[in-house]
Image (cartoon, helix red, strand yellow):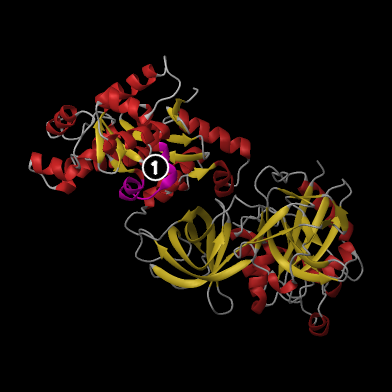
Amino acid sequence: MLKRIILGTAGHIDHGKTSFIKALTGIDCDRLKEEKERGITIELGYAHLSLPSGVKVGIVDVPGHEKFVSKMVAGASGIDVVALIIAADEGIKPQTKEHLYICELLKIKYGIVVITKIDLVDDELLELQKEDIRDFLRGTFLENAPIVEVSSVTGVGIEKFKQVLDEISKEISIRSIDTPFRMPVDDVITIKGFGTVVRGTAISGKIRSGDEIVFLPDNIKGRIRGIQSHGVFVQEGYAGERLAINVPDFKKEDVRRGMVIVKDGFFHLTKYLLVDFFYLPYNDKPLKPRIVAQFHAMTMKTTAELYFLGVEKVLPGNKVFAMVKLEKAYAFSYRDPYVIRGFGIYTTMGGGVVLHPYLKEINRNKITVDYISRLNSGNLEEICSLIIKEQEADGLSINDVMGFLNISYDTSQKILIDLLKQNLLVEDKRTKRFFHKNVYDRLSQTLLDNLEKYHKNNPLKSGINKEELLVKAGGHENLFNLVIKDLSDKKIITVDGDIVKKYDFVPGGENSVFKPMEELLKKWGLQTEEPLKIAEMLNMEEKKVRDMLSTLVKNGSVIKIKDSYYLHKDIFESFKEKIITFFKTKEILTPQDVRDMFNISRKYMIPLLEYLDSIKITIRVPEGRRLRRQ
């Protein structure tokens, strides 16, 4: 597969970033009238380049002015290699430092230092600037980075920069296209004849023209009409590419920078995160255990509260763990980088990576430093187990795992299979969701405890309604249904329609309460009395008698012929067999035949015959009744 990388600029205002990109590509990234007039980059600019080896380079030009650092952070997201631009006539300036720190916080690994405007200084000053730059970069990810001297006016050094970038590109790994697709939106435009076009850097996965996509956090869906990469229409877009995606379903005002394009079913919105946090050493004051600041990730920014764990204060240069509460929900993956800035200028405070991308709430009593350290371990199996456990009875699907950990289907499947083998998870094969074994066991015990309690309080009832038990067990339907099925398969409980009981439960204990009633019904044969009469004879309340009769019906001990007319099952079975035997010699059964056979009045005979019809034993015809063909 053809390698694609993203190059981004960084550096102080007016150090020649945009001019350098124009000299490199022939593309002018200053596209706003205001930018032309003021001579500074306000918005992000875009260009592209092909290197001698064939590597395709997407280029993001970021603003250098202190007021637009938030846009610089948005542009730097997804960058593979940064060109740190330092003007030869000015040297290291405030945004040079801030941009470098931001690149470190965003985990950019590769870079080239570009000294611009060399046509404005003599050799002696140029050498002094190089020495200062080396001192400044010591201890950073650019400590050993190549330095290229260029003039955007004369073109000196431009070809050398391409050669150096080509060499570095060999070290950059191709981004996985098997992980879930994500593209943070950094620009939205309208093109006549096409409609809305969104642009950004694809940071994972792949997308195809015609695919349905989702814009988060607004959760609006649309279909892709076309994709451009490096100014050319393509059928597919891949991680590591600058993409322009045509989405005519939307107006320009429907989408905005800060949204992220994904495929449905992989990512969840959250306001709560666990992170590690590095407090930049140039800060001069310690931080309190709780701060409010600007949170930047990918192309979004929002206000956030940070709660630092295990410390009374955070000193400059220290790294700690923190819980984050965002003002606006967003979708994250494990190890997504972020930046924290204050509300003034020159105020990039620090940043780090997301360690838990889907906390349900901030609970400082439950979240410990040890717990976050385990998330920080990088052991994906352990992390997966921890996050699934935290989801309690909601569980996770394999797509959820792919999105949370930013890994492929095959990797997710392997992790889940290994955890199942270790008996740490259980799988609901019907819903394809995975639950932690501890959560499964806890719900199983809760369900059995509730059944035991119900049987104790309702000894005459055959069992509890399934919906009522679901509510008592916490209302988590997916895991509840799995537990019910497993306990039933193991003959620990019995499920009869909507009624659930413990497998060995018998209403009324050893039938002691029901025995007199069953004996009375047997004694009466086919001509039983109504419940009120039964209550009088057994010295009980009518309601209790009706409840007991309902229980015996559900147990199959008693047959309900119609309202207030009940027969013992042995009596009814005898009656039914005699009727079936009658049809061996006769084709038609009349009421008179029944009266002669059983010596019962019309009061009982008619309901009995209608009940035989209802259970498909007989069928009514003008002459009487026939035996229904089985």
From the viewer's perspective, tell me whether residue 40 is left or right of residue 510.
right
From the viewer's perspective, tell me whether residue 282 is left or right of residue 435.
right
**Corner quadrant of residue 448:** top left
Task: Please determine whether, in this image, residue 348 is positioned above or below residue 56.
Answer: below
Residue 479 screen position, x and y as percent: 42, 42
Residue 600 screen position, x and y as percent: 25, 30
Q: The magenta stretch spans which residues?
A: 467-482
| Residue lying farthest to the bottom in this orientation | 37
Label 1 sits on what residue type?
Answer: Phe
Name the residue that disc number 1 marks: 480
What secondary structure is the stretch in magenta mostly built from? helix
- Name the residue at 15% across, 34% down: 517
Decide if residue 339 is in sight here.
Answer: yes
Find out whether residue 471 is within the magenta segment.
yes
Residue 271 screen position, x and y as percent: 49, 63
Between 235 and 613, the one lying in front of the other is: 613
